[in-house]
Amino acid sequence: MPAESLASAPPAAAFDAAAARREFPALAQRVHGHPLVYLDSAATAQKPRAVLEALAGFYREDCANIHRSAHALSERATAGYEAARRQVQQFLGAASEREIVFTRGTTESLNLVAAGYASRLEPGDEVLITGLEHHSNIVPWQLACERSGARLVVAPIDERGEVPLEEFERRLSARTKVVAAAHISNALGTINPIAEFAARAHAVGAVLVVDGAQSAPHLPLDVQALGCDFFAFSGHKNFGPTGIGVLYGRAELLEALPPYQGGGDMIRSVTFEKTTYNDIPYKFEAGTPHIAGAIGLGAALAALTAWDMRAIAAYEHELTAYGLELLGGLRGVRLIGTARRRAGVFSFVVEGVHPHDVGTVLDSRGIAVRAGHHCAQPVMERFGLPATTRASLALYNTRADLDALAEGIGRVQAMFRS
Ligand code: 7TS
């Protein structure tokens, strides 16, 4: 277990995956006549009953707009939305709920930060990213660089799929204004050393933007201990609804950023001559937000907290080790991404079979995986592959799921041999 992923205290109790799994109704179904084996949580996670009930409960009883109307339902909706913000604050270890902005997801969170910096970067400035980023942590920075004249610099990955710290360090200088890096790679499973990145970025006066889409569902987080200036994650990968996400930003940095969108709720006063903006975080929440989504995300975080993120991380760490040994031992199967610090994401190629065919055959056996470039084309290019098949774990997976995957891969190989 990587040191940074664990708080100092050990989990109070071991994680009961079988009991947690029963909270996810979708996992009980059969697909193509087989029990569903869901191994695509890096794309999106299934939802526990508590989230489904929070969503239905909001629409059934509390449906109203927030921060405006003078009636009981609106007060309840506002209270639920703001309680969810406090839950996110605690989940991330943020200093204040003012530092928690609700967005549509990781993609929007990263675009919000990049658009803000686009107006502050200058020609000669540099933005440093890594070679394992998802497109949503590449393209917004390319746009920001195009608009500002700043330069995009990339710290490359090695054969294992790790970002060597000396490569990262070599590209940092007084010109670097922003460093943007994934906490965990969705294509390789690599866990980046965020605390080390933060220390080095801060030493040259740069801010560190962390794409936490793949870490928030799996690791106990403390954005202050990690040294993140910004941290983005998506509700839907965190067992919450789609269409809701989070941007954490240190208060003074959020205060200094310009608004992302204009509209209702983000203003203090509007005249045709001049508009003044609301305080953070409301300055970044123009228009009616995804109220039910925030409340649903709050329910997901409450469930995760009750299960204990440290216990979940310890459970997934063991399950990942089991999966690595199992898949690593299959003949004709090559794992892509062999970082020493890694999460439960297994990208692989089956010799002689296209990744999409692997995915299709596995699906016919009820096994859900993703095949493709995983919105990380530069990673595929680095390994000289058009695509991989990817199995990704979450807290509700078991060794039996991985056994089913290994058996399914065996069937794929048998079919394509004959
Ligand atoms: N960053 C990383 C590391 C991701 O894995 C993803 C989504 C995103 C950002 C974007 O998140 P969104 O919620 O805004 O779409 N990754 C994947 C995936 O691996 N398969 O489907 C989506």
Image (tube, rainbow, N blue to C red):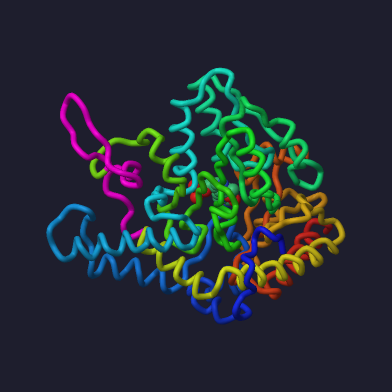
Question: Split into 4 quadrants, where in the image is the C terminus?
Answer: bottom right
The residue located at (34%, 63%) in the rendering is 83
User: What percent of the width, then of the height, locates residue 64?
Assistant: 21, 59
Question: Split into 4 quadrants, where in the image is the N terminus?
Answer: bottom right
The residue located at (79%, 53%) in the rendering is 338
The residue located at (23%, 42%) in the rendering is 264
User: What percent of the width, then of the height, locates residue 76?
Assistant: 23, 65
User: What percent of the width, then of the height, locates residue 413?
Assistant: 80, 60
Q: Is 252 in front, or is 313?
A: 252
Residue 270 appears left or right of 334: left
Q: Where is 144 relative to 229, above or below?
A: above
Residue with the most extreme front position: 203
Q: Where is 167 relative to 59, above or below?
A: above
Q: Where is 326 relative to 338, above or below?
A: below
Q: Quadrant of residue 317?
A: bottom right
Residue 124 appears left or right of 318: left
Residue 271 appears left or right of 190: left
The residue located at (41%, 68%) in the rendering is 299
Residue 389 visible within the image = no
Residue 228 included in the magenta stretch of the image: no
Q: Is 222 in front, or is 190?
A: 222
- Magenta residues (range): 266-293
Q: How many marks?
A: 0
Q: Quadrant of residue 345?
A: bottom right
Residue 11 visible within the image = yes
